[in-house]
Amino acid sequence: MPGQWEFLVPDPGYASSLARFDLQNFGRAAWPQAVWEEALRRKEDHYLIAVACGRTLRSLPRIIAAGGISAGPQSEVLTVAVAQSFRRRGIARMLLGSLLRWAYSAGGAHEVFLEVRRADAGAQALYREFGFRPVGLRKRYYPDDDALIMKLDLSALRKAVNVSQGERFRGAEKEKYANKFSHK
């Protein structure tokens, strides 16, 4: 809930904290610190973290959620995770919405792909809320599970935004897409 946490764009100084956060949330599938250091240096990708508000004696605030997405016409959600004690509060929805807005506006995405654990029905339901649809399966993608490949087609939204000044995009369609990417 705003006031208890805030979104930040992490710099490479967060790599160690993100590696620990990832390990707590993904176990053996977590990215090690070196991968996070490289990821946070890449300008073509965009990462966000949610951190607990209020300063502690530590130099960096506590990470409660993290997400990343790549740029380009075929964008990819690279990671989304929320700490166990902060789940079911809408943080993942806001995080994913922010990442998708960035991919669409700054990253030039027409399509967005992701992999999600085949056994993670909760994450799949969230992705479906945003319009993602299953398009494939990667066997043994995770150490202990297969990955469902999901795709979000942003071409209808991009066409609507690119409609000439004299034309109007139907209100119902505009509302449908606007709600998918808003902070609910």
Image (tube, rainbow, N blue to C red):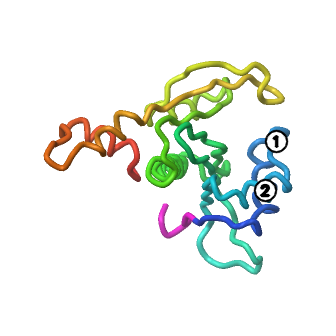
What residue is shown at x 45% (from left), y 47% (from top)? 104
Residue 79 location in percent, x, y?
66, 44
Dividing the picture into quarters, in which one does residue 177 lie?
top left
Q: Is residue 10 magenta?
A: no
Which residue is tagged 1? 27
Dividing the picture into quarters, in which one does residue 178 lie?
top left
What residue is shown at x 81% (from left), y 38% (from top)? 29
Q: In the figure, is residue 111 to the left or right of 55? A: left
Residue 121 location in percent, x, y?
59, 27
Give the alpha-carbon distance from disc 2 to disc 1, as whole Å: 20 Å
Residue 119 location in percent, x, y?
67, 24
Question: In terms of depth relative to the viewer, which is nearer, 4 or 177?
Answer: 177
What residue is shown at x 76% (from left), y 50% (from top)? 22
Q: Magenta stretch: give its range.
A: 1-7
What residue occupies the far left of the structure in this picture? 166
123 versus 31 height, above or below: above
- The answer to whether mark 2 and mark 1 are in CB contact below 8 A is no
* Neighbours of disc 1 within 10 Å: few (<14), some (14-19), many (20+): few
Amino acid beneath label 1: Gly
36 versus 25 height, above or below: below
Question: In terms of depth relative to the viewer, which is nearer, 20 or 156?
Answer: 156
Q: Earlier in the sequence, mark 2 or mark 1?
A: 1
Which residue is tagged 2? 38
149 versus 109 height, above or below: above
Question: In terms of depth relative to the viewer, which is nearer, 112 or 98?
Answer: 112
What residue is shown at x 49% (from left), y 53% (from top)? 102
Amino acid beneath label 2: Glu
Residue 166 location in percent, x, y?
13, 47
